[in-house]
Amino acid sequence: MRLYKRIGIIGGVSPESTAEFYKHIIHLHQKNYPGKAYPEIFINSVDFEKVRHFQLEKDWESYAAYIQEAIHQLKTAGAEFTVIASNTTHIIFNRLKTDREFPVLHIVDSVLNYATSNGFKQLLLLGTRLTMQSGIYHDRIRDDGLCLEVPEIDEQDIIHRIIFEELVYGKINQSSKEKVKSIIGKLQPDAVILGCTELGLLIKPDDTEIPLIDSMAVHAAATWKYAGM
């Protein structure tokens, strides 16, 4: 029997993408190793309302303390490492106390490693307003050959509204899909980073000729791979 590190997932932001993140790990394992010996997974579903309050108030200290406690709870439960199934929550990543004995994998590293390994240089980042306007992605770029751009401010507002008024509730609207497709088509990058774990619920590979980097799927795959190392 193949042995895996026990996975800890900080979820709940939002529940829709957390469920997809979990299922992606399981389905990836099934594809590679038929049977029922899945990796052991602990999910700590945090309070989305608290998280939104910290974000809106820019209370980064309380935000980090809340996520730090969630990580500690996973470690106490028996997880051997953890991941955060959300892009925007990584805005407080550098405030977290992490160590080599209980690592926290960074979603942006998973995404940028995927982009580099596939030869993508010009990247369009879509996500929440905080993700697009902060340094969550820009500050992790180590390859001078990568160029990261974001949509215009009014387009960022459209994407942000779709995420928080529709996708976090599992609502998929065709009109919203067309709006996002229009934004992607206008900029024509090498690849589009779906830098919100809910965006993959709306935009699928068949919706555009431009390659998609679904942060949820890529980070879930990196999580599964790390658990088996």
Image (tube, grey):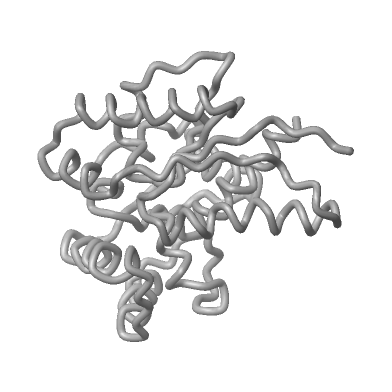
Q: Quadrant of residue 224?
A: top right
Q: Position of residue 145 (x, y in %)?
A: 50, 39
Give the camera-side residue of 214 and 26: 26
Q: Residue at x 50, y 79 (%)?
A: 207
Q: Position of residue 25 (x, y in %)?
A: 65, 51
Taking the image as shown, residue 85 lies to the left or right of residue 176, namely: right
Q: Residue at x 18, y 63 (%)?
A: 157
Residue 155 visible? The answer is: no
Taking the image as shown, residue 135 lies to the left or right of residue 142, namely: left
Q: Position of residue 4 (x, y in %)?
A: 74, 34
Residue most toward the front? 77
| Residue 194 in the image: above or below residue 170 | above
Q: Quadrant of residue 137?
A: top left
Taking the image as shown, residue 129 lies to the left or right of residue 187, namely: left
Q: Residue at x 80, y 53 (%)?
A: 36
Q: Residue at x 71, y 42 (%)?
A: 39
Which quarter of the rendered picture does the N terminus lie within? top right
Give the camera-side residue of 39 and 205: 39
Residue most toward the bottom? 174
Residue 138 visible? The answer is: yes
Q: Position of residue 28 (x, y in %)?
A: 71, 55
Residue most toward the right? 1
Taking the image as shown, residue 178 lies to the left or right of residue 52, namely: right
The mark tally for this picture is 0
Give the camera-side residue of 125 and 148: 125
| Residue 75 in the image: above or below residue 129 | above
Which quarter of the rendered picture does the C terminus lie within? top right
